Amino acid sequence: MMAQSIKNMVRNSALYKAYRQYGLIKELRGQSIQDVKMLEFYSQFVSPGNLCFDVGANIGNRVKIFLELQADVVAIEPQDECARILKRVFGNNHHLRIIQKALGAREGEAEIMISESNTLSSLSPEWIEAVKESGRFSEYLWDKKQKVRITTLDDLIQQHGIPQFIKIDVEGFEYQVIRGLSHPIPLISLEFVSERIEPTLNCIDHLAILGDIKLNYSIGESMHFSLETWIGSEEMKRLLSSLSGETNVFGDVYIKSDLRGL
């Protein structure tokens, strides 16, 4: 208990926060092997001049890649610390617009639970409970809250246009984000975790209502598709359901809409 208290005190100190922010900014301004893998992967479907929405942009790991691919990017990130880093590193890029809000099924306000690791902050208490109980993130704390404004994908589309690609990574709140969408989109990615598969299945059902879709997926941060061919929604739901209960399995589902004739 004493060791944890000291650890928390250090992590909350201004000096530690400044050092941590310096490290994150330095990493963003460099180029890693993972960055190269992401550039190759995303270049399959992000081209110069495309509009991309990065929902749950965090500090901008994907923003960085989309900008390098010469896309126009709308980065949606509600956390104060992350928004500050986004503005400091990328704020002068005229191809980027930063929206400091969360997305959901309808406009309003909510409280985001802030983790000591900002990539784990979430608007979903159920997701937090699931990943703590499974042991995936049992050592982390979500001991701070921040009030955030919520808008919808439909509202962003009305303001900025229909994107070629939407990346959604919001730690268990993906279905609420998808419920705020009534337009088919050429390509969407959704993060999933094996502890909470049901919301991902609900996302697939919602998108299938909007139009004909095909799906693929990737595991972890592999940056390659796991299937050689794209499959239908029911087959993908069965595949994902088979992962339910597995330990520490996560990845992204990719949903491609057929927009011909629309």
Image (spheres, rainbow, N blue to C red):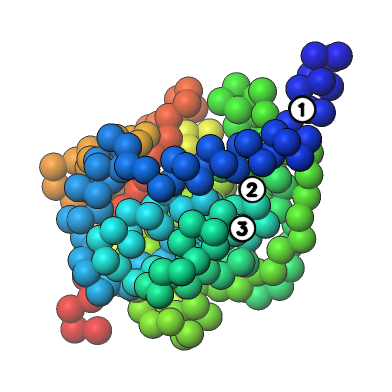
Quarter of the image with the N terminus is top right
Camera-side residue of 152 and 34: 34
Q: CA distance from mark 1 to mark 3?
A: 21 Å
Disc 3 vs disc 2: which is toward the camera? Answer: 3
Which structural element holds mark 1?
Answer: helix
Choose the circle earlier in sequence order: 1 or 3.
1
Q: Mark 2 and 1 residues: CB-CB less than 8 Å, in contact?
A: no
Quarter of the image for residue 63 reads bottom left
Residue 163, can we see it? yes
x%, y% of residue 124? 66, 49
Callout 1 crowding tier (Cα within 10 Å): few <14, some 14–19, many ≥20 = few
Q: Secondary structure at mark 2?
A: loop
The three-letter amino acid code for the residue at tag 1 is: Val
| Separation (CA) of disc 2 from disc 1 | 23 Å
Q: In front: mark 2 or mark 1?
A: 1
Disc 3 on helix, strand or loop? helix
